[in-house]
Each structure stands twice: as C-alpha cells, then as structure tokens.
C-alpha cells in the first residue's frame, strides 16, 4: 500500500486578481469572493483537496495583508499551516518559503501546489490528476511535474507548456520542451492547431528537497535569505530574496527535468472578464449572463452584466461587452480588450485614485 503520509498540498493565495477590477480589489481579491457558487474560490479550492491529502497536510501560502482574512475564511486550516510572506517578492520567493518551511517539518515531503482562485469542474478527475502527479514524483524525485490542460480555444492570457516526448504511458506523462508565458493571440491560435501545447494550470508537484536544490542552483540567494527569515523572523532578510517572477522559468530543466501530466477536468483560471463570462455562459447555457441587481436588455448578445448594488442596468444592442457595477465604480469593457485593465489601474495610480484599487 502506498505511503501517503509525506504528501502535502499548498494553496497559493497571495495574488490580487487585478484583471477582475472593479470587483476584485486590493483589500478583497478574487480568491476571497464568490463567483460561481455560494462559496469563495479559496474555500472551493480547499474543498477539492478533501480526501486526497490528510487535513493536517493542507497549507496555505499568502502575504501579510491577507493572512487575517484567510484565517477567517478557512477556520479548518490550523494557524501554523498558513505560511505568510511578510512582503511580496515574486512567486519564487513564495515557493521557496513554503517549500523550506514544510521541508523542515518533513524532509521527505512531496508538495502539490495549486492556485486558490480557479474554477474546476470534476473533483474526482482533479484528485486523479493529483494522485498521478504525487505518484510520479515519488518514483522520479528529481523531476518537477506540471498539470496541463488541453486548450479548448486560443487564449493570449494564459501560459502554455509545449510537450516533447511520451515519458510513460500509464498514467500518461510527457517530457516538457518549453514553457511560454502569455503568447500573442495569433501565436496561441497556432499552438491550438499543433496539439503540442497545454495550458499551464499553475499546479505543480515536487519534492520539497528537490525544489530547494533547484533554487540553490538557480540563485543561492533565494534559499539563503529565505532560511535566514525562517530562522530569525527578520523581515529585512526576506526583503533580500531576489525577485524572480516565475518559479518554473528559473529552474535548469536539464538537471531537474519538467514533466507534464494531462488532466481531464474542466478548468478556468477566471483570469479576466472574458474567462469568467465564458465559464458562466457555459453554466447558464446562454451567452447573455447577468448576476446581481436588476437588468433589462433589448437585442444584445454575448454580454456579461454583474452588479453588487441595487441600480437598474439596461442594455440595448450591445455585443461582446462586460458591464461591472459596484457601489463606487463602473466598468464598461469590450471583452476583446480585457488585457488593458492594467492600463486603467496604472492611470488611477497616476491620478492618485488609490482608494479605488
């Protein structure tokens, strides 16, 4: 019988979800909100882990500004299992901190890390992917595994993984040729035609020891200052951790080979309004999606209307538009331009409108 006592799950919950402004805000990011059910996205994420990992082996990685709120939202997670970055230093710093923390508790730890703000349909299929990645890493401890989602459409807002060769047949595992961060739409369309690319779901599996060694190889300062912070609690030490924006990109894949396990569950990163509209339209069976408040429409199509206030929203003859109304802000967006939300936020910062962020 397989020993699963060294299997850990870490829910990564430090992001701000800025592309879903004005609903997702700095003080209440998307993982702490309800989009597709009566539960917050982070609560749904933790629920998906039940039965796959021992409850005491479920951890949450977050930043200092969200720690208190996460403890409130997830009372079942022990306080000592919430690993808090005192300041944000990029994804690699976050991974180094939780991998090093768990390694000190269990040097044989195998960690499955997952984002806190995704929508997944098919809990059984999700847990199957988890078990397959755990099993693969337990047999190939020098590798780092990624869960891949077969693309259903070209999407310029997602990361892609190009597979190389079949590593094993049962369960199916591919070697990885390269990782591509958010290609142009034209390139994403070409990826879809080849069948050689998967969406990067940001679900990774690795031995804690292996990731620490890979980081030491990439930049010894990452682990040096992470360890110093763990030992001393000195925030100044953590602020010396080099800012590396993506944990997979800095790893030498010749020394620590990347492997991809294809997944069968339906997945959405809910990374922008287009993605959320696609997801909700599939649930509703209708491309005109309305949530909250009052809405009247005449001859519109392919629109998302969401409101957190009581005002009536009337739409006439619109197509491909998202309208998001909150008590202090209104967004009207052509969904083809949803990547430009960051320009809106940058403009607000330049005008000193930080209370809207």
Image (cartoon, grey):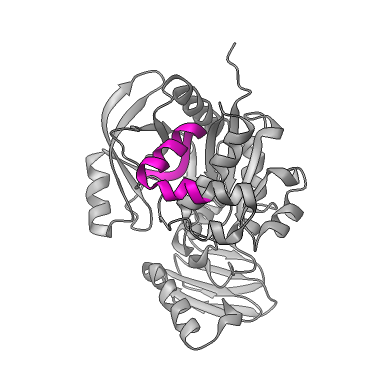
Give coordinates of residue 217: x percent, y percent: 36, 41
- Number of callouts: 0
At 62% from the left and 52% from the top, the residue drawn is 41
**Residue 214 painted magenta:** yes
Pick whichever, 230 or 178, lies toward us: 230
Give coordinates of residue 335: x percent, y percent: 41, 68
**291 relative to 200, above or below:** below
At 33% from the left and 47% from the top, the residue drawn is 160
**Which residue is at the far top?**
1
Q: Please state, as top left, top right, bottom left or bottom right, where the N terminus lies in the image.
A: top right
**Which residue is at the far bottom?**
351
**282 relative to 6, above or below:** below
Pick whichever, 299 or 168, lies toward us: 168
Residues rendered magenta in the picture? 199-225
Magenta residues, dominant SS class = helix
Say left or right for 164 vs 103: left
**Residue 209 painted magenta:** yes
Give coordinates of residue 80: x percent, y percent: 72, 44
Q: Is residue 86 something that shows in the picture?
A: no
Say left or right for 203 vs 173: right
Pick whichever, 164 or 199, lies toward us: 164
Q: Is residue 237 something that shows in the picture?
A: yes
Say left or right for 46 vs 145: right
Give coordinates of residue 279: x percent, y percent: 50, 53
Q: Please state, as top left, top right, bottom left or bottom right, where the C terminus lies in the image.
A: bottom right
């Amino acid at each position: 019988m397989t020993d699963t006592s060294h299997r850990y799950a870490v829910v990564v919950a430090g992001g701000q979800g800025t592309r879903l402004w004005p609903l997702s805000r700095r003080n209440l990011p998307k993982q702490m909100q309800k989009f597709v059910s009566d539960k917050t996205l982070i609560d749904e994420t933790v629920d998906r882990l039940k039965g796959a990992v021992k409850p005491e082996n479920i951890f949450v990685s977050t930043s200092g500004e969200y720690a208190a709120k996460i403890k409130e939202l997830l009372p079942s997670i022990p306080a000592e299992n919430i690993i808090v970055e005192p300041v944000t230093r990029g994804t690699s710093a976050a991974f180094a901190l939780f991998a090093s923390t768990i390694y000190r508790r269990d040097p044989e730890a195998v960690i499955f890390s997952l984002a806190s703000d995704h929508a997944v349909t098919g809990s059984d299929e999700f847990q199957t992917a988890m078990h397959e990645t755990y099993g693969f890493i337990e047999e190939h401890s020098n590798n780092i595994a990624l869960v891949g989602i077969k693309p259903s459409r070209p999407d310029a807002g997602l990361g892609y993984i190009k597979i190389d060769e079949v590593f094993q047949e049962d369960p199916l595992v591919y070697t990885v040729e390269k990782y591509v961060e958010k290609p142009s739409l034209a390139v994403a369309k070409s990826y879809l035609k080849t069948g050689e690319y998967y969406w990067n779901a940001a679900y990774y599996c690795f031995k804690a020891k292996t990731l620490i060694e890979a980081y030491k190889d990439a930049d010894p300062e990452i682990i040096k200052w992470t360890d110093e912070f763990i030992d001393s609690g000195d925030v100044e030490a953590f602020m010396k951790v080099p800012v590396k924006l993506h944990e997979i990109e800095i790893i030498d894949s010749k020394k620590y080979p990347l492997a991809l396990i294809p997944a069968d569950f339906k997945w959405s990163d809910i990374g922008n309004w287009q993605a959320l509209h696609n997801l909700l339209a599939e649930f509703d069976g209708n491309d005109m999606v309305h949530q909250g408040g009052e809405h009247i429409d005449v001859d519109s199509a392919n629109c998302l209307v969401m409101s957190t206030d009581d005002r009536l929203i009337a739409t006439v003859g619109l197509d491909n538009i998202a309208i998001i109304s909150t008590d202090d802000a209104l967004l009207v967006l052509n969904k083809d331009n949803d990547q430009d939300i960051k320009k809106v936020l940058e403009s607000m910062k330049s005008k000193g409108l930080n209370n809207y962020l």
